[in-house]
Image (tube, helix red, strand yellow):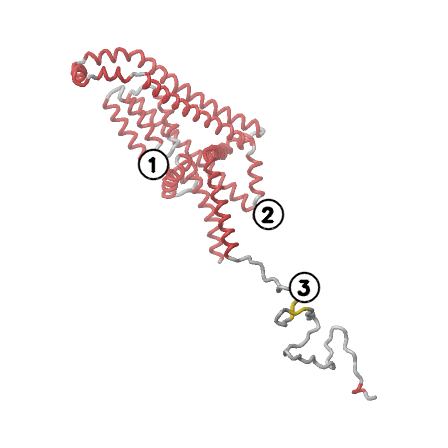
């Protein structure tokens, strides 16, 4: 037998070149080694797969219109429920936001006390006691004049009424319109009940505001005590590869918020000192108490000084009409200088926010969130500018 006639078996995994190719059947198809046998036929005589008698299943309906609609509807439902939940607890969230803002602003004072050797808890206690002393001093400066004026006014009220009744024009008006009779008719039991209800509603509002102030004070102390833990916990939510950069940016944002608090206190102090000087020159009574009220009102930018100016103008009428007019003109001019010159310049130095950005931020914040929006407008703008300058612009320049 010659070498050409010998058949060498193919190695495993290699095709057998000497094996004849499969012959097609009458249907024109060839049998493949891995083909599944057909063990049943349908009514038309066609083969049926015994494992999948009704055909092999297709791909999952992941992008079907029904699933897309269900997913979108579920997302809208979750968004609506989230909106309702936030709306229900919005008053509490406002207190938390204000408390966190105050804690961030007071934290630099706590850190400075820690640097001189005090522990964190003791430093927070010192800051809290200092704030309590200032609050008590303000109350003692404001409440006694208000109480004294109220007592004097109540004692002089019968004489004012008697003198008013003796005037000729009051007698003529009373004879024509029966003013005294109508006033007596107005004091009916139903009207008195309505008036008492209004007084109780006002007292409820006052006690509610006192409760809010106490809640903010307590939350601020808690935030100050756990400030480092809260900050580190927030940084841990950032991926480890970006945590260091997020920590640097976050610390810079917190520093800007502290600078904003310092700037606000400087502006309020300047407004109080200016008001005190004006009242000492013009002879308006209770200058210290009224200057403190102006400083507190001035913590609300753009409109706070107007409230103080209105109060001082009303008090100026007790001295003379020219003094009241001078107070109105003086505080109107000062408010314009503060809004367009003092406030933007101080905030641009403490938070590095441009004058235009500071004014626009305050207006937008007041329109969106009211007083809370005004409080967080400047530091929020500073944070946004920092993120844009350090994150977004370098990324855009690298593309």
Q: Nearer the viewer, residue 282 or 304?
A: 304
Label 2 or label 1, whichever lies nearer to me, is: 2
CA neighbours of label 1 inside 10 A, class few (<14), some (14 to 19), many (20+): some
Query: Which residue shows up at 58% across the image and 49% down it?
Result: 241
Badge 1 or badge 3: first in the primary sequence: 3
Between the residue at mark 1 and the residue at mark 3, the CA separation in whole angstroms equals 82 Å
Task: Find residue 199 and report its horizontal and vertical position in percent.
Answer: 37, 21
Q: Is residue 9 above or below residue 256?
A: below
In-front residue for pair 180/380? 180
Mark 2 in CB contact with mark 1 (< 8 angstroms): no
Mark 2 lies on residue: 240
Q: Earlier in the sequence, mark 2 or mark 3?
A: 3
Label 1 sits on residue: 339
Q: Residue at x 22, y 12 (%)?
A: 163
Mark 2 or 3: the one toward you: 3
Which residue was labeled with disc 3?
51
In three-dimensional space, the C-alpha distance between marks 2 and 1, rounded to whole angstroms, equals 43 Å
Mark 3 element type: loop
Q: Nearer the viewer, mark 1 or mark 3?
A: 3
**In the rendered structure, which disc, 2 or 1, sits on the residue that comes first in sequence?**
2
Q: Residues within 10 Å of mark 2 (few under 14, many from 20)?
A: few
Left/right placement of residue 25 relative to residue 303 reads right
The answer to which quarter of the image holds residue 297 is: top left
User: Measured from the top left, where is residue 77 in percent x and y?
Assistant: 49, 45
Which of the two residues, 119 or 250, is positioned nearer the viewer here?
250
Q: Dot 2 lies on which element?
A: helix
Circle 3 residues within 10 Å: few <14, some 14–19, many ≥20: few
Q: Report the Cα–Cα distance between label 2 and label 3.
A: 51 Å
Q: Secondary structure at mark 1?
A: helix
Measured as percent of width and height from the top left, residue 384 is found at 45, 45
Q: Is residue 115 above or below residue 320?
A: below
């Amino acid at each position: 037998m010659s070498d050409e006639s010998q058949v060498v078996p193919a190695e495993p995994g290699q095709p057998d070149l000497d094996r004849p190719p499969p012959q097609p059947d009458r249907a024109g198809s060839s049998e493949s080694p891995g083909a599944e046998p057909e063990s049943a036929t349908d009514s038309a005589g066609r083969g049926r797969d015994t494992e999948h008698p009704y055909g092999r299943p297709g791909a999952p309906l992941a992008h079907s219109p029904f699933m897309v609609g269900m997913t979108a509807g579920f997302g809208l439902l979750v968004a609506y429920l989230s909106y309702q939940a936030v709306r229900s607890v919005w008053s509490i969230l406002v207190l938390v936001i204000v408390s966190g803002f105050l804690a961030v602003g007071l934290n630099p004072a706590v850190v400075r006390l820690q640097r001189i050797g005090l522990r964190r808890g003791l430093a927070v206690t010192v800051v809290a006691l200092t704030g309590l002393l200032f609050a008590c001093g303000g109350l003692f400066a404001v409440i006694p004049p208000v109480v004294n004026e109220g007592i004097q006014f109540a004692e002089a009220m019968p004489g004012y009424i008697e003198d008013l009744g003796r005037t000729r024009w009051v007698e003529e008006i009373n004879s024509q319109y029966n003013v005294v009779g109508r006033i007596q008719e107005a004091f009916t039991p139903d009207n008195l009940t309505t008036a008492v209800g209004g007084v109780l509603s006002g007292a409820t509002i006052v006690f509610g505001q006192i409760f809010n102030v106490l809640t903010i004070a307590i939350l601020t102390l808690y935030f100050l005590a756990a400030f480092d833990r809260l900050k580190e916990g927030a940084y841990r939510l950032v991926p480890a590869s970006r945590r260091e950069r997020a920590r640097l940016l976050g610390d810079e944002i917190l520093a800007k918020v502290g600078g904003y608090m310092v700037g606000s206190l400087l502006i309020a102090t300047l407004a109080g000192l200016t008001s005190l000087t004006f009242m000492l020159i013009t002879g308006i009574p209770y200058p210290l108490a009224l200057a403190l009220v102006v400083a507190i009102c001035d913590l609300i930018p753009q409109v706070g000084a107007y409230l103080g100016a209105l109060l001082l103008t009303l008090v100026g009428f007790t001295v003379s009409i020219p003094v009241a007019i001078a107070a109105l003109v003086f505080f109107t001019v000062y408010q314009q200088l503060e809004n367009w010159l003092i406030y933007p310049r101080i905030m641009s130095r403490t938070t590095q926010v441009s004058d235009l950005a500071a004014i626009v931020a305050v207006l937008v914040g007041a329109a969106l969130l009211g007083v809370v929006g005004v409080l967080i407008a400047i530091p929020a703008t500073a944070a946004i500018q920092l993120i844009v300058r350090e994150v977004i612009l370098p990324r855009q320049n690298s593309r």
